[in-house]
């Protein structure tokens, strides 16, 4: 990992962001609430936000002039 990437992770943590740590070459990531910043033994990364599934409902309606309009709810 390059120095700029390390700084980005550490700055994210300093700004109260969540990070994760993994022992080098293991790729099992766990939350790091109090990281020791041992870059020789561990890899660190910014925790990705949880992805949420969202349904968007759309209706195709006719307007007063006989045209079609898409309405989102």
Image (cartoon, rainbow, N blue to C red):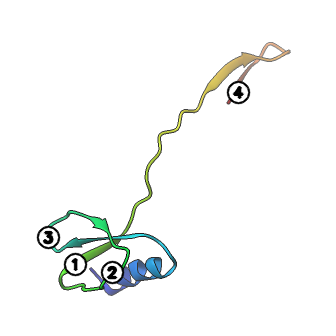
Examine the rendered structure and indicate whether residue 39 appears above or below residue 18. below
SS at circle 4: strand
Labels 4, 1: front one: 1
Q: Position of residue 22 (x, y in %)?
A: 23, 70
Q: Which residue is mark 1?
A: 42
C-alpha distance separating marks 2 and 4? 48 Å
Q: Quadrant of residue 58?
A: top right
* Residue that protrudes farthest toward the front in the picture: 34
Q: Nearer the viewer, mark 2 or mark 3?
A: 2
Q: Residue at x 48, y 82 (%)?
A: 14
In the drawing, does residue 66 fall left or right of residue 35?
A: right
- Contact? badges 2 and 3 (CB < 8 Å): no
| The disc label shown at residue 24, or none | none
Residue 24: percent from the left, percent from the top?
Answer: 16, 74
Determine contact: label 3, label 1, CB under 8 Å: no
| Cβ atoms at labels 2 and 1 below 8 Å apart | yes
**CA separation in Å, label 3 and label 1:** 9 Å
Observer-nearest of 8 and 19: 19
Residue 25's tag is 3
To which quarter of the image does residue 33 belong? bottom left
**Mark 4 neighbour class, 10 Å CA radius: few under 14, some 14 to 19, many 20 or more:** few
Q: Residue at x 40, y 84 (%)?
A: 7
- Residue at which label 4 appears: 71
Q: Quadrant of the C terminus?
A: top right
Residue indicated by mark 2 = 35
């Amino acid at each position: 990992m390059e120095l700029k990437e390390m700084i980005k992770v550490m700055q994210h943590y300093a700004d109260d962001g969540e990070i994760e740590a993994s022992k080098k070459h293991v790729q099992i990531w766990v939350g790091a609430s109090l990281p020791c910043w041992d870059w020789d033994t561990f890899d660190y990364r910014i925790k990705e936000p949880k992805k949420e599934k969202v349904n968007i409902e759309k209706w195709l309606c006719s307007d007063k002039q006989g045209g079609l309009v898409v309405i989102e709810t």
